[in-house]
Amino acid sequence: MVQIMKIVGKVKVGGKKGTGIGFPTINLGISSVSEDIDYGIYAVIVEIKGVEYFGVMHHGNKFINSDNRDEIFCEIHILDFNENVYGEDVITQVLKKIRNVRQFKGEQELVDQITKDIEIAKNIFKNYVK
């Protein structure tokens, strides 16, 4: 599978709002992300300390649980991962766009959509050979 692009960045502390809804994320400094990538939800592979993990990346605005809806975010929910990696350098291979960023009516609708996004990403990862 061919990657769309590669993002290299350092994990920074976020607002822990993803953790609060059951989907912890790592947050990358937005300066790490090329302006060439559209806002959206993507299937990605994240390399941390030489180990690759599958994940789902949100790049764009947050419409729910955000104090600043104009701020741009790059956050990744890494599947089957629960480690503190603040300050670590990561390499993210962006594989495929899943959908556009959109506004949700509430937190449960967001949770339901993230669950669907993860299932779509898992199907994409079936075609990836490490």
Image (cartoon, grey):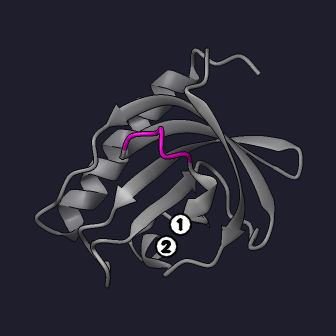
Nearer-the-camera pick, 51 or 94: 94
Disc 1 residue crowd, few under 14, some 14–19, many 20+, Cα 10 Å: some
Any mark on residue 121, and which?
A: none
Element on which disc 2 rests: helix
- Residue contact between numbered discs 2 and 1, judged by CB atoms under 8 Å: yes
Please, which residue is most extreme toward the left here?
105
Task: Examine the residues drawn in magenta and state their main secondary structure.
Answer: loop
Q: Position of residue 37 (x, y in %)?
A: 46, 39
Q: Is residue 96 above or below residue 108?
A: above
Q: Amino acid at mark 2?
A: Thr
Nearer-the-camera pick, 81 or 90: 90
What residue is shown at x 31% (from left), y 85% (from top)?
Answer: 67
Q: Earlier in the sequence, mark 2 or mark 1?
A: 2
* Residue underneath mark 2: 19
Q: Position of residue 72 (x, y in %)?
A: 40, 64
Residue numbers of the magenta segment: 34-38
Q: Amino acid at mark 1?
A: Pro
Q: Is residue 121 above or below residue 117?
A: above
Left or right of 12, for residue 101:
left
Left or right of 94, for residue 84:
right
What residue is shown at x 25% (from left), y 71% (from top)?
Answer: 64
* Residue underneath mark 1: 24
Left or right of 65, for residue 1:
right
What residue is shown at x 49% (from left), y 23% (from top)?
Answer: 124
Nearer-the-camera pick, 32 or 120: 32
Element on which disc 1 rests: loop
